[in-house]
Each structure stands twice: as C-alpha cells, then as structure tokens.
Image (cartoon, rainbow, N blue to C red):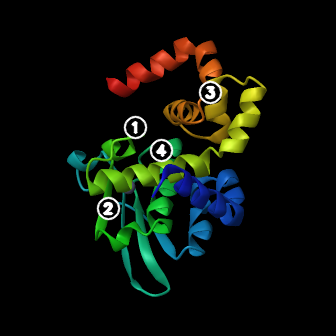
Amino acid sequence: MTEEAIRAKARVFLKTEGAKFNKSPVDTYPDILKTIGAEILPLEVPSRKHLNISGVLLKGDNDNCPYIIGINYNKPDTHIRFTVAHEIGHIILNHLNRVEILFETASNFNLNNNKYNLLQRLEWEANVFAAEVLVPTNKLKQLIVKNLPPWQLAENFWVSQEVIFYRLLTINAHDYLKEYSEWAQKIQNKKTS
Ligand SMILES: [Zn+2]
C-alpha cells in the first residue's frame, strides 16, 4: 500500500473515532477500540529481559472481539498512545491476515522508510498510520504557520519529539526545520545513538 493510501485510511478513521482518540486520556481507549472489534489488556512483562516490549497484537477467540491488544503500561504516556494507534493501524490495514501475531519492540517504532522484508513493511505501514492519526497533517500545518516551537507541538499532540520530527520531514517543512535546526540535530543524534 502506498504512503498516501495509508494516510487516507488514517483520515477516514479520524472522522469516525479520531476526535475522541486525540482528546482521551490513555485509560479511555477501551471505548474507542470497541468500534473496531478490539480489546485492550495490560501486558504482564515477565522479566527485565522483556521490558522493551511495548505491546502485542493477536486474534481474539470470538466474533465479538476479533482482536486482542496487549499494552505494556510501564512505558511513558506518549509511547503508549503511539503503540495503541500503531496497533489500530495493523488492524485497519488487515495485517493479521498476513501474519499470526505481532510483537512490538522499540525497533518496530523506527519511523524511517525501512521495508526490506514483510515484517518491516507492516511495521512501517502501521507507523505511518499512527503518525497520521496522532498528528494529522492539516492540524500540524496550521500550527506550523503559527510558528509554535517543536517541543510545544509535541506537547500539543501528546506525542514524543521524535514523532514530531518525523512528521515535519514527511510534510517537507524545510524552512521550519531550518529555523529549529539545533533541535532537529539533537533529535537526529538521539535517534541514531
Ligand atoms: Zn507493529
């Protein structure tokens, strides 16, 4: 699926449940997920070794709830929000028709365009979906015109500064990024370290 087609699907989702999604605190997600047939459960992280798992997505065992999303609530709020939006992306883009189960780790949240194999491709698609849902292109453009600094954009959309950086790149906000070049450099160093 092309990037634009994924973003279009995200915008359709926003029209149905998105407004609620963007305003809701983390603990009201179950209401939002009901409409797409998913249940959200806290993920028990069995040991320190598994601490980097953000979530898991698998098929449910009945028609009322075709999908189960497990979330590691030990992560920061911004991370949890991104994980939930990412899992909704997997569901709406029908990825569980192609793989049995999806484990989410930090490396899955790489927003770069790495899609060399099926899993990387699916992760990238879910990330594009999540980024559009949490930081809608039109709203981001409106705030850039007001010249809000990037750390305030992150606060406004309740996402990490890395997500804001990625979104600024995808909408080609070159002038804005030039103005905040020191910040952009810092985020890039963090991403590659
Ligand atoms: Zn994923």
Q: Residue 102 carries which label?
A: 2
Marks 3 and 2, how far apart at CA: 33 Å
**Closer to the N terminus: mark 2 or mark 4?**
4
**Closer to the N terminus: mark 3 or mark 2?**
2
Amino acid type, label 3: Ala
**Closer to the N terminus: mark 4 or mark 1?**
4
Q: In this view, does 5 lie above or below 93?
A: above
Which residue position is annotated with label 1? 112
Which residue position is annotated with label 4? 79
Q: Quarter of the picture for ligand 1?
A: bottom left
Percent position (x, y) of residue 153?
A: 66, 31
Quarter of the image for the N terminus: give it: bottom left
Marks 2 and 1, how far apart at CA: 19 Å
Amino acid type, label 2: Leu
Label 2: element kind: strand
Q: Are marks 4 and 1 in contact (CB under 8 Å)?
A: no
Which residue position is annotated with label 3? 173
**In this rendering, would 97 be left or right of 20?**
left
Quarter of the image for the C terminus: give it: top left
Tell me if mark 3 has few (under 14), some (14-19) or many (20+) residues whose alpha carbon lies within 10 angstroms of its own. Answer: some
Percent position (x, y) of residue 32?
A: 61, 67
Q: Do the residues labelled 2 and 4 touch (CB within 8 Å)?
A: no
Percent position (x, y) of residue 94?
A: 43, 69
Residue visible at 63% across and 63% down in the picture: 13
Tell me if mark 1 has few (under 14), some (14-19) or many (20+) residues whose alpha carbon lies within 10 angstroms of its own. Answer: few
Q: Are marks 2 and 1 in contact (CB under 8 Å)?
A: no
**In this rendering, would 83 be left or right of 152?**
left
Q: Answer yes or no: disc 2 within 8 Å of ligand 1.
A: yes
